[in-house]
Amino acid sequence: FQAEDGIRDYKVTGVQTCALPIWTVRLDEQLSGAKPQVIKLDIEGAEPLAISGMSGMLQDPKKAPVLIIEYNPEQAVEAGFTPEEFLRRVVQIQPAYRIWKIGAWLTPLQLDTPALKELRQCNLLLRTMP
């Protein structure tokens, strides 16, 4: 990702691509005053950028939205991030967030554990807990 004046280019190494300018906005600014209860992100590896753009919404543990985020290690690496980067950003902004893998049932996860490092593409639920 290369940012210049709010425009980002997404490039995948080893694949013939063309760059398309995409205007981006911070969710903190776009949803100023709104209090969403749930936010779903599936943006092909750019999740860390989105988390940074909504940091204001995540700061109050009583008002922080539930997050459902696609975890895709391969896309994260292609986008220039470690697979866990967006999770680290969420927990750094708001330590009250807890992480679960969504499947037939919810499986609790923690950062820096073998279970997280072994995950493949899936959806994760993040919710603040007292």
Image (tube, helix red, strand yellow):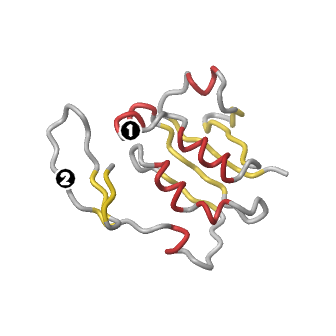
SS label for mark 2: loop
**Which residue type carries mark 1?**
Gly
| N-term-proximal mark, 2 vs 1 | 2
| Residue 89 in the figure: left or right of residue 80 | right
Q: Position of residue 98 (x, y in %)?
A: 72, 43
Residue 66's place in the image compared with 126, above or below, is below
For the point 38% across and 38% down, the residue is: 80
Residue 102's place in the image compared with 42, above or below, is above
Q: Position of residue 86 (x, y in %)?
A: 54, 44
Residues 5 and 120: in front is 5
* Mark 2 closeness class: few <14, some 14–19, many ≥20 residues within 10 Å: few
Q: Position of residue 5 (x, y in %)?
A: 32, 67
For the point 49% across and 28% down, the residue is: 120
**Which residue type carries mark 2?**
Ala
- Residue extending farthest to the bottom is 33
Residues 126 and 23: in front is 23
Which residue in the protein does label 2 denote?
19
Between the residue at mark 2 and the residue at mark 1, the CA separation in whole angstroms equals: 16 Å
For the point 61% across and 41% down, the residue is: 88
Residues 99 and 11: in front is 11
Rendered image quadrant of residue 111: top right
For the point 62% across and 49% down, the residue is: 90
| Residue 88 in the figure: left or right of residue 129 | left
* Mark 1 closeness class: few <14, some 14–19, many ≥20 residues within 10 Å: some
SS label for mark 1: loop
Q: Are marks 2 and 1 in contact (CB under 8 Å)?
A: no
Which residue in the protein does label 1 denote?
80
Q: Position of residue 93 (x, y in %)?
A: 66, 53
Rendered image quadrant of residue 6: bottom left
- Residue extending farthest to the front is 4
